[in-house]
Every structure is written in structure tokens, then in C-alpha cells.
Image: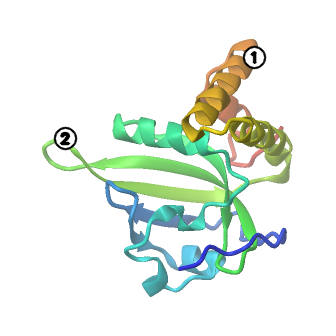
């Protein structure tokens, strides 16, 4: 499957709607709800068995996904704003809540993601941050060095604000699950 070319056009979905997907331990899609399919423009047969990264938008800094995998594999959840890409190259922003699922023996068996609409106010903080992180990643010829440099930049910015990554994300989300700056 060829990766689409970004169009710059944004797709929207309802504030009360929730995109749901599940993956195996390698990030391969095992379930996608109807909203996932409608918004992404893919059919169920096109997504099942494919890596979830098939919807990753090239504007997204890789360091965010590195953080996500580290958290999930250690048994922790993560909230993040994510820009995804549709089959046609359009994009849509979400506030993702990704969690590991545990089996009866307490081992991680798969991952579950609920994604809500991301308010424009939150994206006023997120978009410039992600652009800085992506730029930092691209300054380095070595991919791993780029991610390490972007992670250091993010940690430095958070340290200056005296907050954790989670505190930063939650500062953009109010009690009504609406996002604000």
C-alpha cells in the first residue's frame, strides 16, 4: 500500500464521537470502529492486519511515538494530540488516549486507543511544539540522534515550565473534555 501524499485539507468529526482501534503488541490493527473507517477513508479489510502507523501523518514528530511505545510497553497509558492522515492524504487531529490491555496473568495482551476531537485552541500550542520537535529530528542525519535531540528539547521545555508531559497535555484539557489553551 502506497502512503498518500498530504493534501493540507482537514477532515472533521463530531465533538461527541470517539474513534476506537485496537492493536496487537506489534501495533498491527486488530479492530477499528466505524468512525475510524469513516474518518480515515479506509475499509475494514484495508486496515485489519496493517500497522497502525499507516495513518501516521509525516508532520508528526517520531519522538512522540517513541514515548508512546515506551509508556505502553511499561504498562502505562498515554494521552497525546496526534495528527493522522486519511487514505486520500487529508488529515485529522485527535486527542488520543492509548492504554495497554492486560490478560488474567497481568501480562500486556494488546493496546486500545480512544480518540476524541481536538479543539483548535489546544492545537495552537501543539502545532508549533510539534513543528519544533520535527525540525529538531530532521536536523540530524541519524534518525536515533534526531529523536534523542527532540526528546532532550521536549524535556528541557517541560522542565522550564516545571511540568511533566502529562501535566502539559492535561493543561490543555478542561473538565468537560473540551480542549483549551
The front one of 152 and 175 is 152
Above or below residue 106? Residue 163 is above
- The image position of residue 51, as x and y in percent, is 44, 65
Residue beneath label 2, please? 106
- The image position of residue 75, as x and y in percent, is 34, 37
- The image position of residue 109, as x and y in percent, is 25, 52
Residue at 84 percent of width and 72 percent of height: 9
Residue at 68 percent of width and 27 percent of height: 154
Residue at 63 percent of width and 68 percent of height: 17
- Looking at marks 1 and 2 on the same chain, the residue that comes earlier in the sequence is marked by 2
- The image position of residue 111, as x and y in percent, is 38, 54
Which of the 4 image quadrants contains residue 172?
Answer: top right
Where disc 1 sits, the SS reads loop
The mark tally for this picture is 2
Q: Which mark is residue 161?
A: 1
- The colour mode here is rainbow
Which residue is outermost to the left? 105
For label 2, the crowd category at 10 Å Cα-Cα, with few meaning under 14, some 14 to 19 and many 20 or more, is: few
Where disc 2 sits, the SS reads loop
Amino acid at each position: 500500500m502506497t502512503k498518500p501524499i498530504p493534501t493540507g485539507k482537514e477532515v472533521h468529526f463530531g465533538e461527541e464521537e470517539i474513534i476506537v482501534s485496537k492493536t496487537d503488541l506489534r501495533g498491527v490493527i486488530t479492530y477499528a470502529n466505524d468512525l475510524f473507517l469513516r474518518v480515515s477513508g479506509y475499509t475494514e479489510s484495508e486496515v485489519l492486519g496493517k500497522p497502525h502507523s499507516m495513518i501516521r501523518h509525516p508532520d508528526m514528530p517520531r519522538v512522540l511515538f517513541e514515548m508512546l511505545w515506551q509508556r505502553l510497553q511499561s504498562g502505562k497509558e498515554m494521552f497525546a494530540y496526534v495528527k493522522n492522515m486519511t487514505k486520500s492524504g487529508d488529515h485529522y487531529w485527535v486527542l488520543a488516549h492509548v492504554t495497554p490491555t492486560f490478560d488474567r496473568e497481568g501480562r500486556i495482551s494488546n493496546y486500545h486507543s480512544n480518540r476524541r476531537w481536538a479543539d483548535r485552541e489546544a492545537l495552537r500550542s501543539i502545532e508549533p511544539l510539534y513543528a519544533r520537535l520535527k525540525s529538531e529530528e530532521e536536523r540530524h542525519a541519524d534518525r536515533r540522534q534526531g529523536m534523542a535531540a527532540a526528546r532532550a528539547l521536549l524535556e528541557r521545555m517541560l522542565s522550564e515550565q516545571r511540568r511533566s508531559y502529562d501535566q502539559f497535555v492535561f493543561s490543555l484539557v478542561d473538565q468537560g473534555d473540551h480542549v483549551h489553551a
